Structures are given as structure tokens and as C-alpha cells.
Amino acid sequence: MDHLMQVLHGRGVASGVAMGRVVTMHADLSDIYRFPLAGAEEVGAEVERFEEARRRTSDELRSLRTQVDGELGSDLAAIFDAHLLLLEDASFGKRVVDRIRTEQVNAEWAVHKTVEELEGRFAEIENEYLRERNEDVRDVGRQIMRILRGVSAHELSELGNEVIVVADDLTPSEAVQLGRQGVDGFVLEGGGRTSHTTIIARSLNVPLVAGVAGITGQITDNDPVIVNGDRGEVVLHPTPAMLARYRQQQQQQQEREQEMLATCALAACTRDGVEVSLMANIDLPEEIDEVRRFGAAGVGLYRSEFLYIESSPELPSEDDHLAIYRRIVEVAAPFPAVIRTYDLGGRKLAREVMHTSEDNPVLGLRGIRLTLARPDVFRTQLRALFRAGLHGDLWVLLPMVSAVEEVHRFRAFADEVMAELEAEGVPFARDFKLGIMIEVPGAALTADLLAREVDFFAIGTNDLIQYALAVDRNNEHVADLYQPLHPGILRMLRFVVDSAAAAGIEVEICGEMASDPRYAPLLVGLGLTRLSMSPRQVPEVKTRIRQLEYAALRQLVGECTSLASASEVERHAADFFAARRSAASAPAEESTLRRAQ
């Protein structure tokens, strides 16, 4: 059947263009893919996989029921009776087997679709007790799925090339796994520009469009699709002409990247001679080599929590930490390597670390608070950091600091770890720079006090904007209120920069604002001459800075901070840059005219 082309709109949060066929993922039973089977032999094998998984699930449930009956009583044990009745019901098994045979699909997909169908039927029942049984159906599906994954489970790599994953949401660990398995693009119903899944997609150079409401209900597996992360568009069932146009766009993008790489040997310097250090934000080992390739002046931020994500649910060992930290400081040399201690908590996994749940995790035990609350976990990280400091210019960065006392407590903890290393005769570096993230409004407003306690600031605009404007940065309903150019944000940034200058300490900015060519010049005008961003953004931001004068940018920012709204700031800045472009092109046009005459 022919399908009409359809263009859906979301937010382009990881740039680039990808074309391929859809593979859907569902959060309730994640990592479920539809794999077509070839021939009766493969179909028979999948039926046997399902039946074996069902038998093992039944055995586990019976054992669990007996255990609960003995320890907690028969009332709670009866919960598992409903699960066993459903699991061993002949019609349930027949539905799954029939789906495997008729659709010729893998057992995981057949179980998922059967559970989905049954949940829908239970939801329509008027009787409340029976309607709530859909939770039992969902639980049984999860348990069978867990067993299936341990019995010849399929891998995404079997799907081949040009795969676009469409999901309601993805965790950072899922994004890492999928990106490394060769997925070409992501489309999400949720998500935002600064979510950690988005950061992972950018790190792996995988285009991502987020906030495409209802897309999982509008597509089916194997549908052809185009993902435009630059414009925030998803094209379903593109025409041949549309495919050809996007392939040409991909080619042009590759050519532009090659042109940008030519800037690596050039200084990041304004037209009136002010030097700007453009550093690299990195999350994954794959990005370390890109620091030099794209001409970054060191590492401005390594988010060490992604080392945890890769080894989850296990915690990384001291040797795991040391290996990557040493590599980072060596690659960054002779420039600094800024390594942030674990910023876990909030929505960033860490259940294994916290051993607790929180009603409002974003404002809970996270960042430096978690570091100080669990010294047994973070001692391992600090030992590795201090050992890695022997191999380059190490700067240690503390996340989510909100008070001077937290810096004092961390210094005492660091002294304790150093004493431990010294007693063991383990070589380490005593000299390192200690900095704090300025991402909490309370820290920004007391920057003059905090500047006396540390060697540098790193401004994290992602969280600072979120907290200062009371806007959930990943909530599509208030996405328009997340305004980096809000006058309040600009004034806050100016106070932090002035406080650092008065204390004679360095200040850098490592949030998403630094990597955006629209915002980076304004940051330079604020006096921020150390910007850290994705390595791939360095050439473009460098090119932009080389076109402008620092003195003019300082004047522009002074004017912007007196305006009343983000939209006014955006218009005023746009007019300023448009005038600069016109002035720059006029001499070239005049020269061309003279040559023609």
C-alpha cells in the first residue's frame, strides 16, 4: 500500500540528518525489537525459546510464592497466583505462539504485542477489579522478557544499516548502547535540548529530534523515515525527490565539516586581538581523540558520571577511573583537563549509589551532596584523580555546590584521601586546581564569597537557567520558557564573571550556551574567554569569534542587560550581527564593482 509523505515537527536537539527504517522501542518493556524470521526452522526455534522461557518463569514464580508464603503470609503470596494463572493459561500461550508463526517474528516481539493487546482489553472492562488485572498482564510480560533475554537474545546489530530508533523516551545508557551498535538516528516523544540522552546523542554524532508528540502511535516498524536534527523535522514515507534532496544535504554538511577543520591551526582570536580558549566537553572515550582533531584547547569538562553509566549497575574500579583520567590529561596537555566528580543523583541513575528514592530527586541528594554523603563510593574516584594528576594539568571540578561549607568539607575529605595514598606509598599529585560548578542560583549570587575558596569557576548554564527560571528543561510543555538570553540570566552571569575577576581566578562556561554560535559571542562580550563545548562545535564557534570585535561585543552585552525580555535581547543581538555582516560584505562588493569597471 502506498503511503502519503508526512512531516512531523519536534525539537532538533542533536544536529545532523539521517535516513533509514524505523525500529520502535517501548519504555514499559524496553529494548524490544521486531526481527523477521526466515523459514520454518527459525520459527520453530523461536516457539521453543518462548515455551522454555514460559516454563522457567513459572518455576521462578512458584518458588517465589512459596518463599513469600513462608515469610510474609498467604495474603501476599496470593498475588503470584494471578500471575501463574495467566502464565499457564493455554489461550495466553497460544496467542504468543500464533503470532510467532503467522507474523514470523521473534519471541520477544510476540510477547510484547500480545501483552499490549491484552492490556488494552482489560482496560475496557467496566469492573474495576478486573480492569486492574492489566498490571498482572504487564508484570508477567516483563518476567518472560527477562528470561528470554538470557536465552539466545537478539542484538540490534542484526538489523543492519540505516536504522532509526523511535521511542517515547530513552535512558542515557540505552542511548550509549544503541549509538555504539550503529543506530543512525533517534526520534523521541519526550526529551529536551539539555537532557543527558541528548548529550549522549551529540557525543556519538547521532541526529536526534525530541518532543514529537504521539509519533510511536503513528509509525510501524520498517517505515522509511528521515530525521532532520538541524530543523527538528521527521519525514515519514519520504518521496524519492525528498530522499535525493536530503542526501545532497548530507554531502554538503560533510564538505562544510572538512572546511571547518581547516580552522584548527588558526587562533580563536577576535578581530581586535582578544584570545578566547575554546575547550572540549567530553562524555565518552570515543570523544577523547576529537579534542585534538577539532583544535580544542584542552578539556573544559569531562562528565565522569558517564563512566558510571557505562559500567552500571557495577561501580567502576580505581583502575577503571585511572585509565580514562590519565588518557584525558595526557591528550589535553599542555592545556588543562577539567574532570568533574560524579554528578549523580537527580534523574541520573545512581540508585545503586543512593540506596533510596526521592519525591523530588532534581532538588535532592545529588552532585557534591551525594559525594559527601557517600565517601566510601567517592574515595575510589578521588584516589584515581590524584594519581592521574601526575600526567598532566589536572583541574578537579565539584558539581552542584551551593555553600562555602561544602567546599571546606570536600577539602578535608581530599586531604584524608591524600594521606591514605601517602601511607600506602602510592605516587600522586598534590598540586591540582579545585573548582566548582556555578549552576545553583544561590552559588551564582554568592560568587564573590565562593571565589575566595577555589581556583576556578565553571558555569553550568543548563541547570542554572532551569533553576533560576523555574523551568524543567526536559518538559516540552514549558520548553519555550527555557530562555538562555533572559535578562536575569545575563545579569547573573555578569556578576559571576566580575566576582571571579575580582578574586583573580579563572572562569569558564561549559553549558549548552557555549556551543551555540548565536550565544557564544554574547558570552565573550560578558568577559567569558574560556568556552567549553562539544569538540565538533569548536571550528564553527571559532570561525564566528574571528569575525567579531571584543570591544563591540562588550558594548552589545551592556545594552542587552538593560532590556526587559529575552525576545528583546534576541532581536537586538540579531540586528547587531546583521549590521556587522552587511558592513563586512560592503567592501567586498565595492571591490568587485571596481574590477568589473
Image (tube, rainbow, N blue to C red):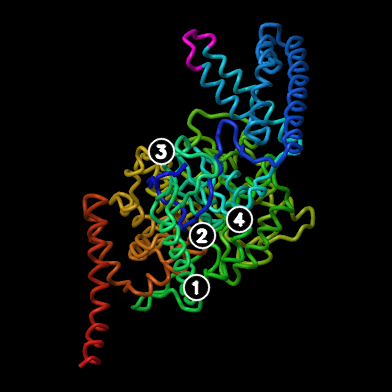
Part of the protein shown in magenta: 123-130
What whole-number distance in Å separates the C-alpha atoms at marks 1 and 2? Answer: 37 Å
Mark 3 and mark 4 residues within 8 Å of each other at the beta carbon: no
What whole-number distance in Å separates the C-alpha atoms at marks 4 and 1? Answer: 23 Å
Task: Please tell me whether mark 3 sits on a helix, a strand or a loop.
Answer: loop
Disc 3 residue type?
Answer: Ala
Which mark is first along the chain, 1 or 4? 1
Which mark is first along the chain, 2 or 1? 1
Mark 1 and mark 2 residues within 8 Å of each other at the beta carbon: no
Disc 2 residue type?
Answer: Asp
Residue at which label 3 appears = 213
What residue is at 43 percent from the left and 44 percent from the top?
A: 3
Task: Please tell me whether mark 1 sits on a helix, a strand or a loop.
Answer: helix
Mark 1 and mark 3 residues within 8 Å of each other at the beta carbon: no
Task: Please tell me whether mark 4 sits on a helix, a strand or a loop.
Answer: loop
Residue 127 magenta: yes
Disc number for residue 455: 2
What residue is at 71 percent from the left and 58 percent from the top?
A: 323
Residue at which label 4 appears = 284
Disc 1 residue type?
Answer: Gln
What whole-number distance in Å separates the C-alpha atoms at marks 3 and 4? Answer: 29 Å
